[in-house]
Amino acid sequence: MIYTTNTGDMWDFIAYKTLGSEYLLPLLLDANPKYHDIYIFSGGIEIVIPDINTDIITDRPEWLAETDEENEV
């Protein structure tokens, strides 16, 4: 799938909008290495959206604890 950026789009927003979670941003970066240095996009850039297996995706990345209280020091 291809996503065409709007002016002001950022990686986390694109990940959330297209893949359902901003935590999946690394998958977008891997699929679009020529755009790694862009933080805020201009309009009209075509971003490749990789196919993902949603069966193995969780709401929180593995490196986060199960609850926010567990993350407190």
Image (spheres, rainbow, N blue to C red):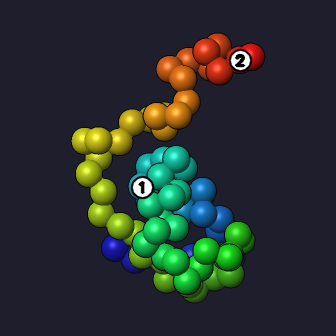
Residue 1's x, y, as percent? 34, 73
Give the foreground label among 1 and 2. Answer: 2
> In the visual, does 61 lie left or right of 70?
left
Residue 63's x, y, as percent? 53, 34
Q: Which residue is mark 2?
A: 72
Q: Quadrant of residue 48?
A: bottom left
Query: Residue at point 30% right, 57% down?
Result: 52
Decide: is 27 above or below 37: above
Q: Is residue 8 visible?
A: no
Front position in the image: 66 or 2: 66
Of the numbered discs 1 and 2, the one sitting upstream in the chain is 1
Amino acid bearing label 2? Glu
Number of on-image labels: 2
Residue 17's x, y, as percent? 50, 57
Dot 1, crowdedness within 10 Å: few (<14), some or many (≥20)?
A: some
Q: Which residue is mark 1?
A: 19
Q: Which mark is residue 8?
A: none
Amino acid bearing label 1? Leu
Decide: is 69 above or below 11: above
Front position in the image: 64 or 21: 64
